[in-house]
Every structure is written in C-alpha cells, then in structure tokens.
Image (cartoon, rainbow, N blue to C red):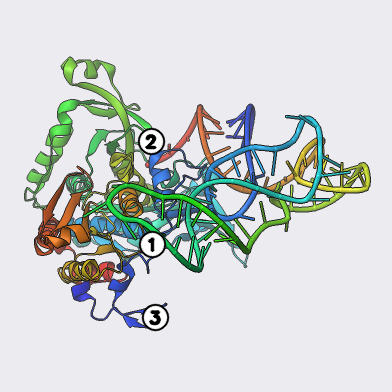
RNA sequence: CGGGGCGUGGCGCAGUCUGGUAGCGCACCUGUUUUGGGUACAGGGGGUCGUGAGUUCGAAUCUCGCCGCCCCGACCA
C-alpha cells in the first residue's frame, strides 16, 4: 500500500526514471493483454474469463504463467490465507518444491504414488521428485527438531507450488498439474488437543473463505488415501463443480460474520464447528440417501460444488510408523496426534470466478479484487477530465487503495467493456458532461447501479467501502503485511 | 490410458474433399473522422500453413511417422 511504499521505488521502463509504483496502475503503463475473443481451448467460464482478462497464459497442459493481474489476485488470496493463519496462531514456513526420493522411500510412498508423481534425476543420478505434497518432509522436520511435549501444540504450514502429473488436466487453473496450495500440519500431545486443532482449522477456514466473498460449505467427506477419523471438505457451490453434493438448504444461511473468535477457546471452536456441521451436507462419496430423506423435502438440495479445501484429523496414523514422537512428562516417548489441512490457492482464483461472474465478465468480490476501483476517463486529453482523474487517483492512492486508471486514448465503449471484463467491483466514470455540473459517476459492477457524486464524495465512498477489508488485514504481522502489499 | 476432435499472422476462423505457391474478421501501425457502451473511411506491417519424411513438374491441400493442444471417460486438491 502506498503509505508503506516509501522504500519501494521501481524503475519505470518508459521514462527511465524513478517513479512511485503507482505509475503501473495506469493502463497505458500496465500489462493487461485482454482478448476480445475467447481462445478455443477454454471450456469453462472461469478459464475463458481468465484468458480473456489477460490473467494467465497456458505454457503446457495444466501449466500456466500468471500475468500481472492474475498474479495480483493470486497474491491477494494468498495474503488472506496468511492473515487468517496468523490469526489462528499457525506458523508459516517454506519447504522446497523439489524433494529427495529417499524421504519418500522411507514412507513407502515413492513406489506407491505412481505416475502422478513427477520424477526427476539430477546430474549425480540422484532420484528427486517435484513434490505433490509434503507429509514426509514436514515429518522429517518435526522429528529432527521436536523432542518434548513442551514444544506442543505446534501447527506449521506453508504455501508452495506442487505438481501432480494428472492424466488429464482441465478447467484452467482449477485443475492444473502445477498448483499453488496452502498445506498445514498440526502436532498435538493428545487426541483432544488435536481435535481442537481440527475445529480451529475449520473455523479459520470459514473466515478465510468468507473474506474472499465465498460461501464454502464444510461437508463430511471421504478421507481417501490419507485416512483418518474425521475429515471435511469445503465446497463452493457452482454449476461447473466437479463434485456432486447433497445438503440441507438451511446450511447456506449460516454465516460466521464478524463474530469474535478466540482460537484458544476449545469450547467456542467446537461450538462453531458443530453449528456449521450439524446440518446435512455431504459430497457424493459419503452421501447417505436415508439420512438425506429425513430433511424436510423443501430443504433438500442437490447441486455441484468445487472443492477449495479439506481438513483431516488422523491421529497417530503417520506419527507412529514414522517415529514422530515426543517425550511426555513421564519421560516416555509418545507418538504425536496429527492432522493436515489444505487450501487450494490457485484453484480458488478459478472458483471465485465460477461463483462470481456475469455475461460481460468477472465480478470480483472486494476482498480479492486486483484493483479496488477503476477510474475511467471518457475524454483523455481533455484538461478537465484529465485533472479530475489525476486527483481521484491521488486521493484513492493516498488512502491506501489501488485504483486502476484507464488513461488510454480509447472510446467510452471500449473502456467500459474492458472494465466489465476484468471485473473491478467499483468504477468511477469521469466525463466532460458530468464534470460540467461537478459530478462523476460511481458504478457497482455487481448491481450495475450508478450514482452521481462529486469527485470527493465518490472517493470517500470507495474508501469507506474498503475500510472493513483493511481492518481485517490488521492481524497479519506488520512486516510480512508490508512485504506482501508492496512488491505487487 | 481408451474414444473423439483440432493444429493456417497475437486471437477467432475460411481454404484441405477436388494439389497450382495463402485469405477474412478482430487486434496492431499511419492519417483523416468520430467521441457517455467496442465510430467510419483510407493506407500499412506481420504467416518456414505444428513437425519430419515421402508422392508430384508443383503440397496448407495427398500418404506415413512424430509432437502439441482440446473434449468425453476412468483418476484427482
């Protein structure tokens, strides 16, 4: 954010002089390769819109470059995940993408994983792999450094690129081979503590998705190859979802809202977990037709959903065989109780678009939008509109917002079409006609409703709209927060 | 991996059946014009037709191999 950008100068490649990073928020200087027509390879709406809005470029099947605006959204989602993990007391770290095969031979998964695992050999003929997940590595780290029950509870997570060599990648970033994912692992002394970690994750995930403008419903799921006693998947309802889901419609009325959560309070976390999981909501894997039939008929729903996260409690399933133990108070080694939890960060970009778009393009929720507001100058080169736009741009930037100023010498229709396509939630339209009576137009992308306001009032209103979103980011460690927002 | 389809300028496509040396729309550049929802006109730049071999006087077009991508299925965060 510009307030903390004082050290963040960048070299403007056109002017060859130092400017503030705000310069790149002008469309004439940004890199936003929008497409009027849809590349034929894209099938589902989020993939089409991401290509058309110049967010990604496919480099190979299921492998994408993230162009500046797509990258911005990806990083905004990542920042929200970090912020909510920090709030829940989880500790960030980073494990490598490449892993030695030996670690996986220990767990017997090197052979078990099959062709989905991308295997690589280095110059010394050592077997390596591009990690599809990190259980082995985190367990190695844990057992190398944690010996005492006094070091528990502990929850470590990282956000890193993973690779699964899917037979058939599809749906753009929703099912790529390379994907960006948050995965976390909790280590607890007792089953009860580990179940609290489970509940705590469920609650923090709910918050995370709500901040992204998504309703992700926790559904009882199948633990699959990871195994374990308890697992929930978080599903975003969307027609293009890959999973069939069944639920009680009342479940969609429950919101976390801005209630205060104490993540150390076992009873409170448990109560929230129970509140959100009491009603019937399951994926087809665990669907129970009899239980479903008990729901009042008018509330029975079947739909499709996109899986955007999953949490597991699996107790000592891994710690026991892999020797992840700590010494208890009595001096005896105890296998730790574990769980793991994932959020599909890159997949969320697609999922959010699936859940929020219309025929004209993307409609970003305020929490993840790449730019907070678009400024459209209807008559570039006109002294009045130019000055009004610059002033708006300055006022919004000063308030810590990132506007995208369309300063191209384009016609109104073209500018509107671009803004609609890229989906910024708010647009301020500045034209000579309105300026004559001292007003600009503030338009909501979602509703299409506009109101005429003085430039000052329009800026103020936009600043106010985003105030709650800024407040939510405050829990994130100040240093880290700064770095996340400045280098974009 | 089984089934289907497609590779022609940045994007969308025609041309392939019936071989004669590449075309349209959009985008891009120049000029005029226009300016509150993709203005109109004129001029212009850009393509080893995925790739290799073959048939032929001549191949985007016919034959064979290979590569890539998309869709359906099985699989998956």
Residue position for label 2: A224
Instruction: Give how far across and how far down residue A94 sits, in percent.
Output: 35, 64
Secondary structure state at the residue bearing disc 1:
helix
Looking at the image, can residue A488 be seen? no
Report whether A107 appears left or right of A402. Answer: right
- In the image, residue A387 lies at what x, y percent? 21, 71
Seen in the image, is B26 located left or right of residue A8?
right
Q: Mark 1 and 2 residues: CB-CB less than 8 Å, in contact?
A: no
**What residue is shown at x 48% (from left), y 48% (from top)?**
A177
In this rendering, do the residues under marks 1 and 2 share a single chain?
yes
Quarter of the image with the N terminus of chain A is bottom left
- Mark closer to the observer (1, 2): 1
User: In the displayed structure, does residue A474 sit left or right of residue B62?
Assistant: left
Residue, far bottom:
A17
Give the residue number, with chain letter if any, for mark 3: A15
Side of B56 where A87 appears, left or right: left
Q: Quadrant of the C terminus of chain A?
A: bottom left
A419, A271: nearer the viewer: A419
């Amino acid at each position: 954010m510009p307030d903390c950008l004082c050290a963040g100068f960048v070299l403007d490649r056109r002017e060859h002089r130092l400017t503030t990073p705000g310069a790149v928020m002008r469309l004439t200087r940004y890199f936003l390769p929008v497409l009027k027509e849809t590349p034929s390879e894209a099938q589902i709406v989020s993939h089409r819109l991401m290509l058309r809005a110049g967010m990604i470029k496919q480099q190979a099947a299921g492998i994408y470059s993230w162009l500046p605006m797509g990258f911005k959204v990806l990083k905004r989602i990542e920042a929200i995940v970090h912020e909510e993990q920090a709030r829940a007391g989880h500790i960030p770290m980073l494990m490598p993408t490449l892993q030695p095969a030996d670690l996986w031979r220990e767990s017997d998964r090197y052979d078990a994983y099959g062709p989905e695992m991308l295997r690589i050999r280095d110059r010394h003929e050592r077997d390596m792999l591009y990690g599809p997940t990190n259980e082995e590595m985190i367990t190695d780290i844990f057992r190398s450094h944690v010996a005492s029950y006094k070091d528990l509870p502990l929850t470590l997570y990282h956000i890193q690129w993973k690779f699964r060599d899917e037979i058939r990648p599809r749906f753009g970033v929703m099912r790529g081979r390379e994907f960006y994912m948050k995965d976390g692992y909790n280590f607890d002394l007792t089953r009860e503590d580990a179940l609290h970690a489970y509940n705590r994750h469920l609650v923090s995930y709910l918050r995370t998705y709500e901040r992204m403008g998504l309703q992700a419903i926790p559904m009882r799921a199948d633990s699959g190859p990871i195994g374990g006693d308890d697992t929930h998947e978080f599903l975003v309802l969307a027609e293009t979802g890959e999973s069939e889901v069944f639920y009680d419609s009342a479940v969609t009325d429950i919101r976390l809202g801005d209630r205060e959560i104490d993540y150390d309070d076992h009873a409170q976390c448990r109560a929230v977990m129970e509140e959100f999981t009491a009603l019937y909501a399951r994926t087809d894997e665990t669907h129970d037709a009899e239980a479903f039939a008990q729901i009042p008929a008018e509330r029975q729903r079947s739909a499709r959903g996109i899986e955007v996260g999953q949490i597991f409690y699996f107790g000592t399933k891994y710690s026991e065989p892999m020797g992840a133990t700590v010494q208890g108070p009595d001096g005896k080694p105890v296998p730790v109780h574990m769980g793991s939890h994932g959020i599909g960060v890159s997949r969320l970009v697609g999922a959010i678009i699936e859940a929020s778009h219309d025929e004209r393009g993307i409609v970003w929720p305020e929490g993840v939008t790449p730019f907070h507001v678009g400024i459209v100058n209807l008559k570039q080169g006109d002294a009045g509109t130019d000055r009004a736009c610059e002033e708006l741009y300055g006022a919004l930037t000063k308030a810590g917002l990132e506007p995208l100023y369309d300063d191209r010498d384009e016609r109104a229709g073209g500018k509107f079409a671009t803004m609609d396509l890229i989906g910024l939630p708010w647009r301020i339209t500045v034209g000579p006609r309105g300026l004559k009576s001292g007003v600009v137009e503030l338009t909501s992308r979602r509703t299409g409703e506009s109101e005429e306001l003085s430039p000052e009032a329009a800026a103020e209103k936009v600043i106010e709209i985003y105030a709650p979103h800024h407040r939510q980011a405050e829990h994130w460690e100040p240093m880290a927060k700064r770095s996340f927002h400045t280098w974009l």
